[in-house]
Amino acid sequence: QGSSDCAERGRCPRPPLSPCQDRLWSMALFACLLAAACLTSGIAMAEEVEFQDTPLLTSMWQATSSSDNDALDRLLDSSAGAVNSRASDGRGLAWWAFEFQNTYALGAIIAYGGDILSDSQDLGGEPAVAMCEKNPDCSPGDLAAKAKEMSVDIARRKEEREKERREMQDEEEDIGDDEF
């Protein structure tokens, strides 16, 4: 048999390994499997959100229910995980935004990296969009389309606020350096 004939059939015999090589091969395979398991569980853990009532969530509910967009921006700016935070009933910003038909809140979710049409469910087994689907006066498609359009401006203003914050921090550091 030529080496090309063997490779074409995909059944080339493997030379026998020494006991040391065999042990190394087993250890390498085990390490790969362990790394894959750790990576998979890490991803699953990163997606899990603790359901817990917090002052932040209460404030986000109030801002969403009263359409206080400035307050919602401040709250989302204050905490990187706010957009995905969930109350003890499993609901969060997306549920309230659909419940109150608040397109600004839905746009903010998109601008802050959230998914308004996520399959995530509350403790009652309902995704956020179900809050709108249960209401005959609510059109999930229209809300989502308006929110996506609005998210562009919300994201732009978010970036402007972040830039202003960085510039202020740089100025404060410069002033602190002058004092010494």
Image (cartoon, grey):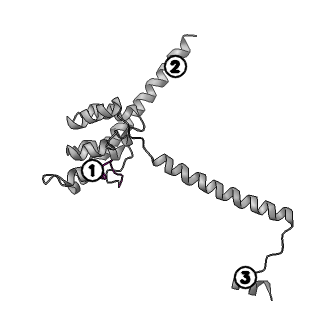
Instruction: Report, in whole angstroms, how far the alpha carbon at label 2 lies from the one at label 3.
Output: 68 Å
Frontmost of labels 2 and 1 is 1
Q: Amino acid at mark 2?
A: Asp
Task: Say if 16 sits above or below 43 in the image.
Answer: below
Return the x and y of residue 53 as percentages of the image width and height. Answer: 35, 34
Residue drawn where x is 32% and y is 42% of the image? 89
- Point out which mark residue 163 bears: none
Residue drawn where x is 31% and y is 53% of the image? 125
SS category of the residue bearing label 1:
helix
N-term-proximal mark, 2 vs 1 = 1
Return the x and y of residue 8 as percentages of the image width and height. Answer: 70, 84
N-term-proximal mark, 3 vs 1 = 3
- Point out which mark residue 11 bears: 3
Number of marks present in the image shown:
3
In the rendered image, the residue lying farthest to the left is 137
- Looking at the image, residue 66 sits to the left or right of residue 23; the answer is left
Given residues 79 and 37, the one toward you in this image is: 37
The residue at which mark 1 appears reads as: 149
- Looking at the image, residue 169 sits to the left or right of residue 24; the answer is left
Provide the residue span drawn in magenta. Answer: 119-128
Per the picture, the main secondary structure of the magenta-coloured stretch is: loop
Instruction: Report, in whole angstroms, how far the alpha carbon at label 2 lies from the one at label 1.
Output: 39 Å
Given residues 10 and 166, the one toward you in this image is: 10
Frontmost of labels 3 and 1 is 3
The residue at which mark 2 appears reads as: 174
Q: Are marks 2 and 3 in contact (CB under 8 Å)?
A: no
